[in-house]
Amino acid sequence: MLMRKRVYRYISFLILFPFFSIAQSDFFSRLADSALTLTRQKVVYDLSYFPIAYPNGDVPKDKGVCTDVIIRAYRKMNIDLQALVNEDMRSHFSLYPNNWRLKTTDRNIDHRRVPNLMRFFSRKGVVLPVSTQANDYRAGDIVCWQLSRGIMHIGLLVHQKSKDQQRPLVIHNIGDGQVMEDALFAFPVIGHYRYSK
């Protein structure tokens, strides 16, 4: 009887897997499109600390940094990274980077820090290979980079390609607002993730 149940589950998995894969693929496609819409919003790069609502809080809509691109793209998919990161950090605070020597969580800023998002995506999402091969990257992927002076950066890949059609373009905010650029290999890649709830 137990063997029959296992066989039934396996057959069910094989039947449903293509539908699950299509749904997942469709999710990341829509996520990439949601990031693209952010480029129509005029945003000034602003590193300021903002007290924000919780859950679904956001900094003023005309301000933001690189992490806000990710947060806003996911929010368009009805996924609140502010709440999800906060909940995970409250339950597993010691697993998150302690770069800021904090003793507890901060709903206003924790989800807006690249190291925290990297830890969250590595815990709750899929960690993908970090490589220099453009074919390893797809629309909907989250990529993190190491900039100079220890600064980390994050962006989201879209369907649009570079002029030579070799690389997916990136939606990010590295100082000029929420823009789409050929920036996948502009800096050393240190993280590559896919996340859906």
Image (cartoon, rainbow, N blue to C red):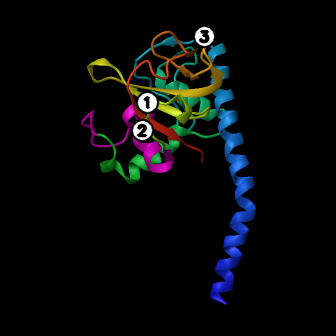
Circles 1 and 2: CB distance less than 8 Å? yes
Picture layout, residue 185 above or below residue 175: below
Magenta stretch: includes residue 111: yes
Q: Which residue is mark 3?
A: 42
- What segment carries the magenta color? 98-127
Q: Which residue is mark 2?
A: 118
| Picture coordinates of residue 143, whole percent (x, y) | 48, 31
Q: Residue at x 50, y 9 (%)?
A: 176
The answer to whether residue 94 is left or right of residue 59 is left
Q: Earlier in the sequence, mark 1 or mark 2?
A: 2
Q: Which residue is mark 1?
A: 144
Q: Residue at x 52, y 33 (%)?
A: 142
Residue 164 in view, yes or no: yes
Q: Earlier in the sequence, mark 3 or mark 1?
A: 3
Q: CA distance from mark 3 to mark 2?
A: 26 Å
Q: Residue at x 67, y 81 (%)?
A: 5
Q: Amino acid type of disc 3?
A: Lys
